């Protein structure tokens, strides 16, 4: 092999590992934004509900407040990136998210907790969206599969957050339901530990060529409309599962040990499979990628509804855990394939707005049905229904026009 070829191969490998480590650093933002701030609430919900004597609607209201804040954060994320710079706005959102986790331990007032969850929704949306924008800018346009893999690495941070929460919170809660504030403190400290890695990684990423657009054009919105609608419905379906799954398993007679293993399996499978999803989804240029993810997540909700028991818990953790966090990966890749780099952050922001609208509706709807029927299982059926609809809607997303697709244009040049 010629020396020049060997040098080129070595340089490419060095670039690959540098890109991976940068994505890993940014993934700590994803871990805080969703793994620690949103999904860990599913572990803290049962003790908070028992200690504070909440109804299911009140318990769901905190996630709805978080979703409402997420909508606002998604709306302003691209504007903040344009005004302050993507990296600076990302780190600011990260820092506020950690602070909110710590402050949540300081009050038992429902109104104060709703306010904190709303602020946390704003900051975590900014963190997650701008982190996705940064990781999308790491890799050259002409390598869509590699970009897909890096997005998968970034989103896998959410699963790491889920695993860390699953390891820490059950130990704390062994002392009784009244120890839930200590759980929030631990989540905040775990988030703070990831801030230095995020700071170093964000400094390495250059702003996408052409800057960052604050808003998409009408034409660009129409181009990704099926993905936008489908992702919103997906948000409503998946968040209902993540909000009430632990309460459902407890109602079905699941032991604390079984639920800990369920949560660990969910997080571990999600972390591993999301790395694989990234490369798989990078091969799709239309809506089949998200549709496949949403359909798999739908199947993952059914075992605990149809055949309650340890086997169903394990199967649900594997199927749902192996797909739900591929949702953000799949729509990020659609945005990359459909639009120019300058539009990526604005596109991810818009898609996240749709997603956040769904997240505000899902917990309240499922909680209301559970309260009316007196059975959490009845409200839980909302999740598979909405996930099935989301998969069907995303099949309407067409492939990009080759001349207008940056990824395809790069391949043809």
Image (spheres, rainbow, N blue to C red):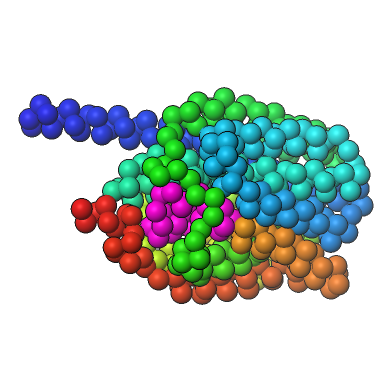
Residue 338 covered by magenta stretch:
yes
Q: Tell me if residue 137 comes above or below residue 367 in the rendering.
A: above
Q: Is residue 160 left or right of residue 176?
A: left
Residue 311 visible in the shown view: no
192 vs 231, left or right, is right
* Outermost residue, left side: 2
Q: Position of residue 197 (x, y in %)?
A: 53, 27
Which of these two is toward me, 149 or 175?
Answer: 149
Camera-side residue of 235 and 202: 202
Residue 233 on the magenta span: no
On the image, the x and y values in percent for residue 136 come to 43, 45
Nearest the eye: 8 or 349: 349
User: 360 or 165: which is nearer to us?
Assistant: 360
Name the residue: 57% across, 33% down. 88
- Callout count: 0
What x and y, as percent, mark residue 219? 46, 66
Tell me the magenta residue range.
326-352
Query: Residue at (28%, 48%) from the top-left corner?
Result: 142
The x and y percentages for residue 92 are 63, 34
Against 347, is 364 above or below?
Answer: below
Q: Which residue is at 87% across, 44% downward? A: 112
Determine the main secondary structure of the stretch shown in magenta: helix
Q: Looking at the image, which residue is at 20% across and 33% down?
A: 9
Residue 399: quadrant of the picture: bottom left
Is residue 207 visible in the rendered image? The answer is yes
Q: Is residue 397 above or below residue 159?
A: below
Figure quadrant of the N terminus: top left
């Amino acid at each position: 092999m010629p020396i020049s070829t060997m040098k080129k191969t070595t340089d490419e490998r060095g670039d690959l590992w540098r890109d991976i480590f940068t994505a890993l650093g940014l993934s700590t933002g994803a871990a805080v934004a969703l793994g620690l701030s949103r999904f860990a609430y599913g572990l803290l919900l049962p003790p908070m509900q028992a200690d504070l004597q909440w109804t299911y609607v009140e318990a769901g209201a905190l996630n709805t407040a978080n979703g409402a804040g997420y909508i606002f954060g998604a709306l302003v994320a691209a504007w903040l990136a344009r005004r302050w710079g993507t990296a600076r706005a990302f780190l600011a959102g990260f820092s506020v998210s950690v602070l909110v986790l710590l402050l949540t331990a300081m009050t038992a007032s429902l109104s104060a907790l709703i306010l904190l969850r709303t602020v946390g929704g704003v900051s975590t949306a900014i963190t997650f969206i701008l982190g996705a924008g940064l990781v999308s800018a790491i890799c050259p346009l002409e390598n869509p599969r590699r970009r897909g893999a890096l997005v998968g690495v970034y989103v896998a941070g959410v699963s790491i957050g889920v695993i860390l929460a699953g390891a820490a919170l059950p130990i704390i809660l062994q002392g009784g339901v009244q120890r839930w504030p200590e759980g929030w403190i631990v989540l905040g400290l775990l988030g703070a530990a990831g801030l230095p890695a995020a700071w170093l990684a964000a400094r390495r990423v250059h702003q996408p060529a052409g800057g960052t657009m604050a808003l998409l054009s009408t034409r660009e919105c129409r181009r990704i409309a099926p993905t936008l609608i489908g992702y919103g419905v997906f948000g409503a379906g998946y968040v209902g599962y993540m909000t009430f799954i632990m309460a459902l398993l407890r109602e079905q007679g699941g032991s604390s040990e079984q639920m800990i293993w369920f949560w660990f399996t969910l997080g571990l499978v999600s972390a591993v499979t999301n790395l694989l999803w990234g490369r798989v989804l990078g091969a799709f240029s239309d809506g089949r990628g998200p549709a496949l993810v949403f359909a798999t997540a739908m199947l993952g909700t059914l075992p605990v509804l149809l055949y309650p028991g340890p086997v169903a818990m394990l199967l649900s953790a594997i199927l749902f855990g192996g797909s739900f966090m591929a949702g953000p990966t799949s729509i990020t890749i659609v945005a990359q394939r459909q639009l120019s780099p300058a539009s990526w952050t604005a596109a991810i922001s818009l898609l996240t707005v749709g997603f956040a609208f769904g997240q505000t509706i899902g917990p309240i709807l499922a909680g209301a049905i559970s309260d009316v029927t007196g059975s959490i299982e009845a409200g839980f059926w909302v999740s598979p229904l909405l996930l099935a609809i989301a998969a069907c809607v995303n099949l309407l997303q067409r492939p990009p026009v080759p001349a207008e697709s940056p990824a395809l244009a790069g391949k043809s040049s």
